[in-house]
Image (tube, helix red, strand yellow):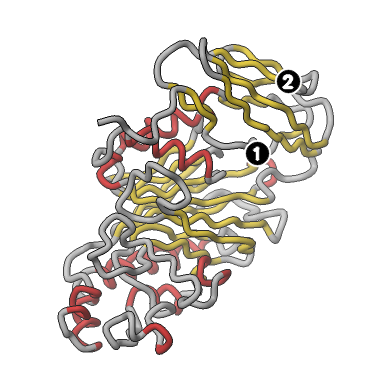
């Protein structure tokens, strides 16, 4: 059977914003990963690039001579095909911090992309087209996460078990919590701009929507939630609270597959869809009480209009819910956008979950004036 998403050569995205660069500092961008090629030799070239930038093999590199925004065409060719991506590189003066705006993706990889043909290629399509700078992976592994980071040319990898964080910016410290792992992503060491990014994968047993479907009342559903997922989330919150007390200016982003819906979605307005129930789901309420903001619902406030049903686009017979989240806490970060991605956004979707991308903007120049905590 021929994969209908197969193309010999194609650009993974029409336009690509490279990572920020500092004027006078060396800059490197891995270029070949921006294209998908199946067989045959790939030749890259650039058109309209600034004089400081050169292409050697698969690497774009050079030292910018001054601030500005540089845009050019990156061209890939095989013997029979040609593809073009418009690349933009923002160059900042050295007194400005890198990563003013950055994008975070959370993605359940469905057993490391092994359940679909050519899953690794399809995952890279998502990672690149989403514009993500940092990715929280679930159902991953050390090999899977490192392979993705290497393909992207990213230096940052942190995790254990099946939950990992990969980043185009360095990860300079790590932490563990129940059912979660974090990396301290350093956007700009010189400006001490850093954020703890967590990838969480909470337990799947006693799944609440199944109980609701099977006639359980609210008290019974909450009892089951408190058997596994809620204690894991509260344990992670306790770890993050301790870290925040030690370093209050470093924000935390807690993302992943919670295996539980949100109280912001199971409301009176949605009760007809949700088996007639309005449920104060313990995981989401605990995070809210701890000061975390559900970034998707912060932007898309109406669960009727924008349900974001991440479980599951692949199995329509399942109860449909939003169980994947990006939560953020800390005055240093502002949410500027958050979107749901699924098969309708990217043909050849490789997961049984939908994904979310949140864009953040730094509110302050300094995230923390001391060492990591």
Q: Is residue 227 left or right of residue 136?
A: left
- When the figure is inspected, residue 201 is found, relative to residue 223, above or below; the finding is above
Q: What element carries label 2?
A: strand
Residue 22 location, x and y as percent? 74, 34
Residue 252 location, x and y as percent? 51, 60
Question: On the image, numbered disc 1 is attached to which residue?
Answer: 17
Question: On the image, numbered disc 2 is attached to which residue?
Answer: 47
Residue 158 location, x and y as percent? 40, 42
Q: Can residue 118 be seen in this view?
A: yes
Q: Which residue is drawn at 44% across and 66% down?
A: 308
Q: Which mark is in front, 1 or 2? A: 2
- When the figure is inspected, residue 72 is found, relative to residue 248, above or below; the finding is above
Q: Residue at x 34, y 73 (%)?
A: 283
Q: Residue at x 29, y 55 (%)?
A: 314
- When the figure is inspected, residue 74 is found, relative to residue 234, above or below; the finding is above
Q: Can residue 198 be seen in this view?
A: no
Q: Which of 245 and 126 is in front in this view?
A: 126
Residue 118 location, x and y as percent? 32, 32
Per the rendering, the mark at residue 164 is none
Q: Nearer the viewer, residue 254 or 193?
A: 254
3D distance between C-alphas at marks 1 and 2: 16 Å
Q: Counting other residues with Cα less than 10 Å from the Cα at mark 1, is it few (<14), some (14-19), or many (20 or more)?
A: some
Query: Mark 2 or mark 1, which is nearer the start of the sequence?
Result: 1
Q: Residue at x 17, y 66 (%)?
A: 205
Q: Is mark 1 on a helix, strand or loop?
A: strand
Q: Counting other residues with Cα less than 10 Å from the Cα at mark 2, is it few (<14), some (14-19), or many (20 or more)?
A: few
Q: Which of 6 and 162 is in front in this view?
A: 6
Q: Is residue 120 left or right of residue 34?
A: left
Q: Is residue 55 left or right of residue 290?
A: right
Quadrant where the image shows the N terminus:
top left
């Amino acid at each position: 059977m021929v994969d209908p998403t197969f193309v010999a050569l194609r650009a993974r995205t029409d336009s690509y914003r490279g990572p920020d660069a500092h004027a006078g500092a060396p800059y490197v961008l891995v270029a070949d990963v921006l294209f998908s090629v199946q067989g045959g030799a790939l030749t890259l070239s650039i058109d309209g690039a600034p004089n400081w930038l050169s292409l050697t093999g698969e690497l774009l590199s050079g030292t910018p001579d001054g601030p500005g925004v540089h845009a050019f065409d990156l061209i890939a060719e095989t013997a029979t095909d040609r593809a073009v991506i418009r690349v933009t590189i923002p160059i900042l003066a050295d007194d400005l911090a890198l990563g003013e705006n950055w994008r975070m993706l959370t993605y359940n990889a469905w057993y490391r992309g092994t359940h679909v043909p050519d899953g690794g290629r399809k995952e890279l399509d998502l990672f690149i087209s989403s514009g993500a700078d940092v990715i929280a992976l679930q159902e991953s592994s050390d090999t899977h996460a490192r392979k993705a980071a290497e393909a992207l040319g990213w230096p940052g990898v942190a995790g254990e078990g099946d939950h990992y964080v990969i980043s185009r910016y360095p990860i300079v410290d790590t932490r563990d919590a129940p059912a979660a792992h974090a990396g301290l992503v350093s956007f700009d060491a010189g400006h001490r701009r850093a954020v703890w990014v967590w990838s969480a994968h909470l337990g799947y047993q006693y799944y609440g929507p199944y109980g609701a479907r099977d006639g359980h009342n609210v008290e019974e559903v909450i009892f089951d939630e408190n058997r596994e997922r809620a204690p894991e989330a509260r344990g992670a919150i306790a770890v993050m609270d301790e870290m925040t007390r030690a370093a209050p200016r470093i924000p935390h982003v807690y993302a992943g597959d919670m295996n539980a819906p949100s109280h912001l979605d199971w409301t009176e307005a949605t009760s007809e869809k949700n088996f007639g129930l309005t449920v104060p789901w313990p995981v989401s309420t605990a995070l809210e009480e701890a000061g975390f903001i559900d970034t998707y619902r912060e932007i898309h406030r109406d669960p009727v209009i924008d349900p974001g049903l991440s479980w599951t686009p692949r199995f329509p017979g399942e109860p449909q819910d939003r169980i994947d989240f990006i939560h953020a806490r800390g005055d240093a970060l502002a949410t500027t956008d958050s979107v749901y991605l699924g098969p309708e956004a990217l043909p050849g979707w490789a997961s049984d979950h939908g994904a979310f991308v949140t864009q953040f903007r730094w509110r302050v120049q300094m995230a923390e004036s001391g060492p990591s905590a």
